[in-house]
Image (cartoon, helix red, strand yellow):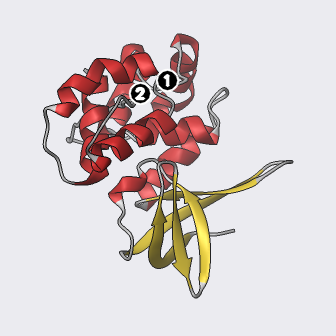
Amino acid sequence: MYEYMNGMVTVVKPTFIVLEVNGIGYKLLVGNPYQYTVDQPALIYVEQVIRDTEQVLYGFTDEAEKALFDQLTSVAGIGPKSALAILAANDQDGLTVAIANGDVKFLTKFPGVGKKTAQQIILDLKDKMVVTDGLSHTNAIEPAAVTDPNFADGLAALAALGYSTKELDRITPKLEKLDLEGPDGYVRAGLNLLRH
């Protein structure tokens, strides 16, 4: 029904943003909300998912990310929230290469993706992946007692993506040593640490 929305970001929370378009605020679930800032204009590609009990709008930075979301949700065992958590790593090239090369280990690092689901992703999508030259890596984190609000928000966003306390506790000491700008920086760094 919707292809994209062009408006102003009015709310940024750990699991969603609100995009105001012509006086109407749309709640959009996005992989990394902290890549957006309040009062920032944004063009966001949208996928509407309608179920018996809910209607949800998922938001994406570009058409390629939206297409990858659609491919992931076509795989048995991958729902919209799992697909969004996978995309939150912001590593489309790494994901594409992993699927094309049958890299089960890479895929099982995402929350909610076990060996069986990873194999299903590879089976269903391997022939649909176009490998490009780029490569990047990311992953997630979870909260401890934190004084920096950007760090705390970054950890909350990682936890919201489905990473366990154990996973987040493992990377928290490394993240605490970093002096990054905004929650987005901590989310990206955390995703990177979780991948390695």
Instruction: Confirm whether residue 77 shows in the render.
Output: yes
* Disc 2, SS: helix
- Identify the residue at image location x=53%, y=26%: 121
* Disc 1, SS: helix
- Identify the residue at image location x=46%, y=36%: 86
Q: Earlier in the sequence, mark 2 or mark 1?
A: 2
User: Looking at the figure, which quarter contains the N terminus?
Assistant: bottom right
- The image's mark for residue 138 is none
Instruction: Confirm whether residue 128 shows in the render.
Output: no
Amino acid at dot 1: Ile
Coordinates of residue 183 in the picture (x, y in percent): 30, 50
Coordinates of residue 64 in the picture (x, y in percent): 42, 54
Amino acid at dot 2: Ile
Vertical comparison of 58 with 9: above or below: above
Vertical comparison of 169 with 68: above or below: above
- Choose top left, top right, bottom left or bottom right for residue 12: bottom left
Coordinates of residue 60 in the picture (x, y in percent): 47, 57
Coordinates of residue 106 in the picture (x, y in percent): 36, 20
- Identify the residue at image location x=37%, y=35%: 96
* Left or right for 167, reference 20: left
Location of mark 2 (residue): 99
Location of mark 1 (residue): 122
Do the numbered discs 2 and 1 sit on residues whose CB atoms are within 8 Å? yes
